[in-house]
Amino acid sequence: MGKIKVFWNKIKIKNKLSIFTGIVILAILVAIIFDAVLIRLFVMDVNNIMDDNSKAGEIVATIDREKEAFDLFIESKTNDNKEMLLKAAEETKKAIAAEPLDYIHLGENRYAQLFSICTSYGEYSRYRDQLINSTVEGNAYINTLYSLYSMQDYLQSYGHRYVDLTLKESNGRYKELIPTVYAVPLIAITMSILLLSVILELSGMMNKSITEPVLKLANASRKIAANEFYIDDVESDSKDELGELVHAFNKMKYATGEYIDALEKRREAIEKLHVQEVEKLEVEKQLEAMNLELLKNQVNPHFLFNTLNVIGGMANLEGAETTEQMINSLSFLFRYNLKNQEKEVFLFQELKVASDYMYLQKMRFGDRVKYIPNCSVDDDKVLVPTFTLQPLIENSIIHGITPKVEGGSVYVDVSKNDDKLYITVKDTGVGMDAETVTKIQDSLDGKGDHSIGIGLGNIYRRIKAMYADAKMVIESELGEGTSVTIILPFRDPEINYDEENE
């Protein structure tokens, strides 16, 4: 049994299912075969025996009835008695004809008796018809009558002997069938118990090698979703696809926990460089420009940039390329946010900020987050509002991707249609229901008091303040993700729009 379990743990899931299905089908086929055998025994064989007994008994019964009808006719030769005799004779003829003269089926003795009955009854019928139709008279009538009585006795004798032989042969066939009748159910029960034991054993092994690992993985995934990375490894003895999945899951769990801890420590170290925390202002009353200005006043750019450059230089000296790249990306983000005084910047600058931000997020979340940008316009010949893309992408990460255990993707699509620029940030996160989307859209349009995020509200107010015909469209479906599209006038840096307006 131990070797069977070792073999079972090594084979693929597809083969396990095939083996289990084959055993179940075999059990069904065995049941069908034994049912067919029992049907043949009790329906066909037993029915043949009963049929033979019935036909033999019918021959004797019809001969006896014909003799009684003949006696009544001799006593009183009325038309009614004649009709009764003719009817009884017809029944006897049919009963004898119903048992065919088949030597193979009847056997030597029964065949001889049935042959005698058929031959004698034919001769008897000829004399009987002469007597009934009054074709003989006087002494000939008496002789014919006594001959008929003698023939009737012989026919009854042959009939009873035929019945005795039939019953004797039937009893012999019954005795031959009895061992089989007893054996078939016993064999069927034994085979059923054996196959049921095999099915139960296979079911138990399938449960242990497939169901239990899946349940353990699901339980561990729920704990990881709650940020419990340092839990016991999921155990599985299987060497199939599930075993490989469990092994990979354990490695991923450990690596993810270590990686997030490292990123968290780096984040805390960077936060310690700030002299003060950035104060939050009420989004409904302040524009993004005020938030940016407040951030600039709270953080000493010189000190921050110099410190980041020192950290980046140390990372370069230590050969920590990934750390250096993260520092450089973070430095660019701060420099862009704190030193950029323009309301509008080139599109390629916003895309660069978005790319650096997503690089840092991928360092934090790994393969859980994917970033797919697509720009179908010339990004160095288009002006867009400052600090537009990164807050939208941040919303997608925080509210859409992070709550989803398996993570997701963030798509940025920039395109032009007529004189309009379309910037779409779409994620495959948890999404929102229709009611929530309607409330947010109404709040943006000033129709409701539903609370919206700082980034989203500030971006909307800034673009509306800068462009009268600017729009923001939010689309989302629960479980499918969220899409935010900003529609702006297409701004070419080589055109002076202030002069055009004048």
Image (cartoon, grey):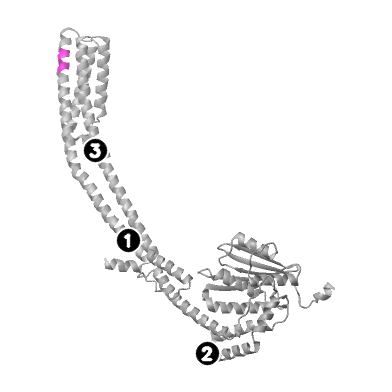
* Mark 1 vs 3: CB contact within 8 A: no
Front of the two marks 1 and 3: 1
Work out whether mark 2 precedes mark 3 in sequence or the reverse, and give the earlier one. 3
Query: Residues under labels 2 and 3: Cα distance?
Result: 93 Å
Of the image marks 1 and 2, the number of the one nearer the N terminus:
1
Q: CA distance from mark 1 to mark 2?
A: 55 Å
Q: Which residue is mark 3?
A: 46
In the image as oriented, which residue stretches furthest toward the right?
Answer: 502
Q: Position of residue 463 (x, y in %)?
A: 72, 71
Q: Magenta stretch: residue 145 in it?
A: yes
Quarter occupied by residue 470: bottom right
Residue picked out by circle 2: 319
Q: Which is more N-terminal, label 3 or label 1?
A: 3
| Label 1 to label 3: alpha-carbon separation | 40 Å
For the stretch drawn in magenta, the main secondary structure is helix
Compared to residue 343, the image places residue 197 above or below, namely above
Name the secondary structure under disc 1. helix
Helix, strand or loop under label 3 = helix
**Which residue type does callout 2 highlight?**
Gly
| Placement of 67 over or under 115, stated as above or below | above
Residue 438 picture location, percent across and down: 64, 61
Q: Quadrant of residue 116?
A: top left
Label ID, residue 386? none
Label 1 Cα neighbours within 10 Å, binned few <14 / some 14-19 / many ≥20: some
Magenta run includes residue 424: no
What residue do we see at 65% from left, 83% from top? 298
Q: Which mark is residue 202?
A: 1
The residue depicted at 17 percent of the width and 34 percent of the height is 108
What's the magenta region? 143-149
Crowd tier of the residue under label 2, counting other residues whose Cα lies within 10 Å: few below 14, some 14–19, many 20 or above: few
Q: Is residue 207 above or below residue 140?
A: below
Amino acid at the residue labelled 3: Val
